[in-house]
Amino acid sequence: MDNTLQKIGVVGCGLMGAGIAEVCARAGSDVIVVESSQERADAGRGRLEKSLRRAEERGRLDSADEVLGRIRVVTELGDLADRDMVVEAIVEDEGAKVELFKQLDEIVTSPDAILASNTSSIPIMKLATVTKRPSNVLGVHFFNPVPVLKLVELVPSLMTADDTVERARTYVDGELGKHAITCQDRAGFVVNSLLIPFILSAIRMYESGFATAEDIDQGFVLGAAHPQGPLALADLIGLDTTMAVAQSLYEEFKEPLYAPPPLLQRMVDAGLMGRKSGRGFYTYDS
Ligand SMILES: C[C@H](O)CC(=O)SCCNC(=O)CCNC(=O)[C@H](O)C(C)(C)COP(=O)(O)OP(=O)(O)OC[C@H]1O[C@@H](n2cnc3c(N)ncnc32)[C@H](O)[C@@H]1OP(=O)(O)O
């Protein structure tokens, strides 16, 4: 069996999908990204171009065009047939991911191909068991902004083959130059299990009128050397995603510390998603 992963597929070209496609293409992989409509594909392509041009302007990349030449953004899942690994990065919705994994299992032809999910909270087992190749399914969880943050969580389910984990680790550490850690298939994995209760506590503190958003965030930037405070970070992650991860954690463990506070729910209901919608705990220009 050829163990190298060269042809990569990414499903979803939002915040995370575009970042994953970017780092894979910058590492030299041939990348196909699938979006659900032409409009979304155009927006995803624009996101990729903006990020790569910025990297080129800042001298961190020789040629944005060369990297863009390795990425195709398409609207047909069928175009992923010849991929060595497909990373799913669609909306954090279990039903949608399950449906996608059923389809990917039919489409991706190589029996050795890896089907990976960038989910941050949905059990990998639920995605693995709808395929005929559960030993080739695992979680490969990147962090936002993907081009900046080094960590990738590798999450095998009870059915994942050791060889699948090692092939993914070789790609993540060796090709992408990131750092993989491994953990069990439990909602939240390592980082979100710790980060989400922290963010939710900050939202409760703000909601109670205990301190302003600015002061809560400054407390962590200046008092604990975090690059940004918990409310600014929630805006970066997206309040809808923060909410979805909190709900998954709460469903899994039934611990009150994971229960989304009412303010978060109200903000999501109002369409205040953070950076990507222009307003969350702060307002943003574009
Ligand atoms: C919920 C999910 O499941 C899991 C998650 O993703 S949890 C979220 C994890 N993410 C974090 O914790 C992020 C914490 N925050 C940070 O690391 C930093 O605040 C930050 C990198 C987002 C921004 O850094 P900051 O210094 O405030 O801003 P900025 O000056 O714009 O950026 C600094 C450098 O970061 C890089 N950068 C920032 N955003 C970037 C992006 N979207 N794409 C590429 N590079 C970016 C650039 O290299 C930039 O340098 P440049 O000015 O030369 O271009």
Image (cartoon, helix red, strand yellow):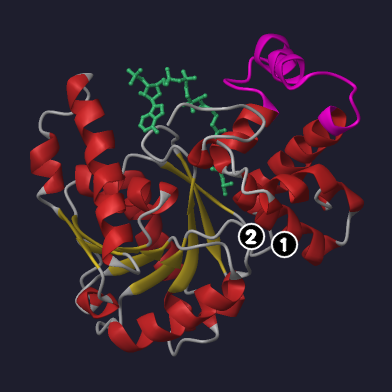
The residue at 31%/68% (across/down) is 37
Return the residue nearer the eye: 218 or 272.
272
- Residues tagged 1 and 2 counted as in contact (Cβ below 8 A): yes
Looking at the image, residue 218 lies above or below residue 171: above
According to the picture, the residue beneath numbered tag 1 turns out to be 248
Work out which quarter of the rendered image holds the C terminus and state it.
top left
The residue at 31%/75% (across/down) is 113
In the drawing, does residue 212 fall left or right of residue 43?
A: right
258 is within the stretch colored magenta: no
217 is within the stretch colored magenta: yes
Q: Residues within 10 Å of mark 1 (few under 14, many from 20)?
A: many
According to the picture, the residue beneath numbered tag 2 turns out to be 121
Q: Residue furthest front?
A: 270
Work out which quarter of the rendered image holds the N terminus and state it.
bottom left
Task: Residue 83 in the image: state x and y as whole percent.
Answer: 23, 71
Q: Which residues are magenta?
A: 206-230
| Residue 95's disc number | none
Q: Secondary structure at mark 2?
A: loop
Q: Secondary structure at mark 1?
A: helix
The residue at 84%/48% (across/down) is 262
Residue 158 showing in the rendered view: no
The answer to which image quadrant residue 226 occupies is: top right
Q: Residues within 10 Å of mark 2 (few under 14, many from 20)?
A: many
The residue at 73%/36% (across/down) is 199
The answer to which image quadrant residue 76 occupies is: bottom left
Queried on whether the Cβ of the residue with tag 2 lies below 8 angstroms from ligand 1, the answer reads yes
In the drawing, does residue 119 fall left or right of residue 164?
A: right
Task: Residue 6 in the image: state x and y as whole percent.
Answer: 20, 61
Return the residue nearer the eye: 188 or 284.
284
- Distance Cα–Cα, label 1 vs label 2: 6 Å
Q: Residue furthest top?
A: 222
